[in-house]
Image (cartoon, grey):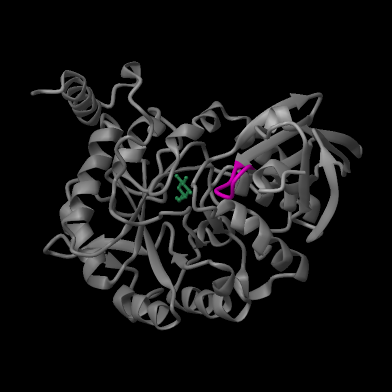
Amino acid sequence: MYNRKLILTVVFLSICLVSNLPSMNCPANAFTIDNGLARTPPMGWNSWNKFGCNVSETLIREIADAMVASGMKAAGYRYVNIDDCWQVSRDSAGRIVADPVRFPAGIKALADYVHSKGLKLGIYTDAGTMTCEKRPGSLDHEIQDAKTYAAWGVDYVKIDWCNTEGLDPQKQYSKFRAALAQSGRPIVFSICNWGQNQPWTWGPATGNLWRTTGDIRDNWASVLKILDNPSQQHADAAGPGGWNDPDMLEVGNGKMTDTEYRSHFSLWAIMAAPLIAGNDLRTMTQATKDILMNSEVIAVDQDPAGKQGSRVRAEGGLEVWAKPLKETATVAVALFNRTEAPASISAEWADIGLPPGKAKVRDLWSHSDRDLASNSFKTSVPAHGVVMLKITSAKSRPNGD
Ligand code: GAL
């Protein structure tokens, strides 16, 4: 006997898979790229925010060394990613050519070096005719480029969206998805079309992460702008294997205070964002290290349930953000003060999805337990700062409260 409901469901999901029309209300993450990668948000480093076009094999080797020596590798950071400007031309066979002055030993040798440190190498290209910095793009070279990267031992590719007039992002990025799948090497696929064309609807079926916003800058207004971007509301598109990407980190680049960098890092963790450091790992202050390597905040970002958190309350610049964690009846919470003066902020269990009653409160920046709280937890939060908490309902424990 045919099960009619099952058949209708299969037909509906198949149409979703092929069309991915936003109007169909296809279940988020119903189809993920399923390449087995990025089961938690990718962690690593990228050259762009600090170094722009000033990339070279010396820099990348030194960053890989620093990633190990500083403890970043032990904290979970793995990918060392070269952004724009490593490429200069194509050879007579159409193969992409790395800058022979800046990368004299070539990308393969660099990948070998990075791998010898127990790390992974990432690279950058563009879906159009040229990258944003006018280097050769991958248009009509998708299969060839994916093969070249695989042969070099590349583990991660970020694909940008400059110089793509007349192209459809879903189609172009799907070509890369297929090309990478055929390349013979597992390669994390990072889509970078700045949140245009609703990537949260087709991103999960296409790549492992998709940018949801324009470029981040090393200033407070930029962090707030990204947090307020409507594209951040698509939390249900994220999950193991596919993540909304609010752009790379600016922590440690010098134009924000450490309090602001702590907020930036905490909220990226609440959003289950990729944690791609964008600073000079060779010269980090202790404060920068303490932020980027806060294992309790990283654990929130990397929580295996893979749920993206979101803003659950906002009043006069005082906000509560919450992210459900895998542990039973447990939520990560950021009390976030956007104003210019210290203020009290309260997390109400009703807002953050916990049952009424007592709960255990852990402070993830002071690394200490706070008093048991009932139904809500209120505390003072510095200007531009966060208090980040892990709250576990006593109801999750067999003996109750
Ligand atoms: C932008 C992208 C940045 C960086 C830059 C390189 O489009 O959003 O993250 O990759 O291009 O030119």
Instruction: Left or right? Give the position of 72 relative to 400.
Output: left
Magenta stretch: give its range: 324-329
Find residue 94 and report its image quarter. bottom left
The residue shown at (44%, 58%) is 83
Asked if residue 204 shows in the view, the reply is: yes
Find residue 162 and report its image quarter. top left
Outermost residue toward the left in this view: 1
Q: Which quadrant would the N terminus be assigned to in this image?
A: top left
Outermost residue toward the top in this view: 23
Instruction: Left or right? Give the position of 84 relative to 359.
Output: left
* Main SS of residues in magenta: loop
The residue shown at (69%, 70%) is 284
| Residue 279 on image: x %, y % | 61, 62
Is 175 magenta? The answer is no
| Residue 72 to residue 309: above or below | below
Q: Which quadrant would the C terminus be assigned to in this image?
A: top right
Is 327 magenta? The answer is yes
Instruction: Left or right? Give the position of 373 relative to 6.
Output: right
| Residue 299 on image: x %, y % | 60, 57
Residue 107 or residue 395, whichever sits in front: 395
The residue shown at (34%, 80%) is 112
Instruction: Left or right? Give the position of 339 relative to 38.
Output: right
| Residue 227 on image: x %, y % | 63, 35
